[in-house]
Structures are given as C-alpha cells and as structure tokens.
Image (tube, rainbow, N blue to C red):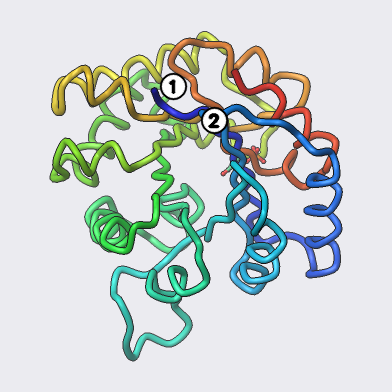
Amino acid sequence: MRKQIAAANWKMNLTVDKAEALLNDILSAQINLSEDQLAVFAVPFPYLQMAQQKLNNTNNFFIAAQNCYSKKSGAITGEVSVEMLQSLGIKYVVLGHSERREFFEESNKFLAEKLNIALEYNITPVFCCGEPLSIRDAQTQNEFVAKQLEESLFHFSKDDIQKIVIAYEPIWAIGTGKTATSEQAQEMHAHLRKVLADNFGKDVADNISILYGGSVKASNAKEIFSQPDVDGGLVGGASLVADEFITIIKSLK
Ligand code: 13P
C-alpha cells in the first residue's frame, strides 16, 4: 500500500534556534501515525544534523535534504553529496523543486542523474513536477508534466520507480495563497498515475505516493488529502508554523 505523507519544505527559512523550537513544538504534540503515514521535514543543510538527532527515536518522522548533487564526491565547491547525506542517516531528498528548476536551471536530464545517485545511496527522492501559469492558461499542463516524468523517470525499472515519491506542485499555486481546487489536484494526480501506469503498469503506479504542493494549509489540507489519488502534501509556508503543520499531519488519510 502506498504511503500517505505530510512533507514540510522549510526552504531558506528559520535560524537554528527557531528551527529547533519548531521541531520541539511539533514533536511535543505526540502525533500518532499509522504504519502507512509519514511526516518528513526538508530542512536547510546546516540544520540536518540537529534535526536528524532530534528525530532519532521517533517512528514515522524523517528528515530530508532539499537538494543534492549528482556526483558522489569531488572538487565541486558548495555542493552537497548523497554520500554526505547517507553518512548523517538522512533517508529523503527533495529533487526538482520548481525553485531549483527556475533559479538554478536544473533540467529534467540533470534531475535524472540526481535521482539515479539518490537511489544508489538508498535515499528516497521526493521528485517535484508542475506547470507554470502560462501552461495552465493554455491548458497544456497534462502534456507538460508528462514530459517532466518521461525525461526524468522513465528510465527506471519497475522496482526502482516505486522507491520514488512524486510531488505535483503547480507553480501558480506556490506561495501565492492560490491553491488548486481539490478537483484540479485530483484530476492532475489521476493523470500522473495514468502516465505512470502506461509506462510501468497499473500495479506499480498504484504503489507510488503522489503528494500535492501549493498553498496547502491547516484549513484546506483535509479536503485536498481526501482525494483518491492525493497521498498527502508538500508544504512550504504553513510548515513553518507548528500548529498549522500539526493539523496538516493529522489531516493525512
Ligand atoms: P507553499 O506551501 O508556501 O505554497 O509552498 C509550496 C512548496 O513549494 C513546497 O515545496
């Protein structure tokens, strides 16, 4: 059965004291998750070790990096490798976020290389896809996201593709307060699952968690997560507020 996941993406926010206090507040809520429910915190690199140590004895709570490089090690100043993440016990990495695609020109092909090395090191990638507003306005979003999947994911085996979590994040809904409606989210998630089923088979597609991201908050999480093909969310702004994110975690189905 596929996992239901509430993933926080802190992006480039919080100082170390605030980050620690936020994790303390969320952990002290003692949220009980079932075996197929997870909470994941994608924290900035400097806080990985602190956050990882804090979550060490908690079931179903995991720390993620927000990025990694496509090579194991070497003379690449300023980058962080999967080998480093693995040495800290990190189990998840966010790849292909629209902000990395836009500000750092990360292509589908480059992301395929990062996905490869993450799996090689047993780190679960949360692979982000999603269309800009111009594509949504032209109603070509289905083709756009299918191409993102095709160019970054279709080379994987049936076994390996099931180790990847997908996050659909329409760019027009990120940080804008303008959420996709639950119908729009369900429509796209069903499309993504069909694209995966056509290439890898229905059984495989049914095992892949597909998260929704873009202005998810405490007040809309339950409605969005209740959609049959939505398996939780990737949350930016609302994940920085303990009470908001606690409610979002509790909204998992
Ligand atoms: P917001 O929840 O702030 O819209 O951000 C979504 C996002 O980009 C998560 O990765």
Q: Is residue 48 above or below residue 91?
A: below
Q: Along the line of sight, which residue is nearer the eye, 50 or 117?
A: 50
Of pointers 2 and 1, the one earlier in the residue sequence: 2
Q: Residue at x 31, y 20 (%)?
A: 206
Q: Is residue 172 above or below residue 48?
A: above
Q: In the image, residue 172 lies at what x, y percent?
A: 55, 32
**Which residue occupies the foreground of this view, 88 or 136?**
88
Quick one: label 2, few (<14), some, or many (20+) residues within 10 Å? Answer: few
What residue is shown with label 2?
35
Q: Quadrant of the C terminus?
A: top right
Where residue 4 appears, x then y in whole percent?
A: 52, 27
Which quadrant holds residue 122?
bottom left
Circle 1 residue: 137
- How many residues crowd around disc 1 within 10 Å: few (fewer than 14), some, or many (20 or more)? few
Residue at image coords 55%, 27% = 232
Foreground of the two, 98 or 203: 203
Quarter-of-image position of residue 109: bottom left
Please tell me whether mark 2 sits on a helix, a strand or a loop: loop
Secondary element at tag 1: helix
**215 left or right of 97 in image:** right
Looking at the rendered image, the disc whose residue lies closer to the viewer, 2 or 1, is: 2
Q: Is residue 138 above or below residue 125?
A: above
Residue drawn at 32 percent across, 26 percent down: 207
* Residue 37 pos. (x, y %): 56, 30
Counting labels gives 2
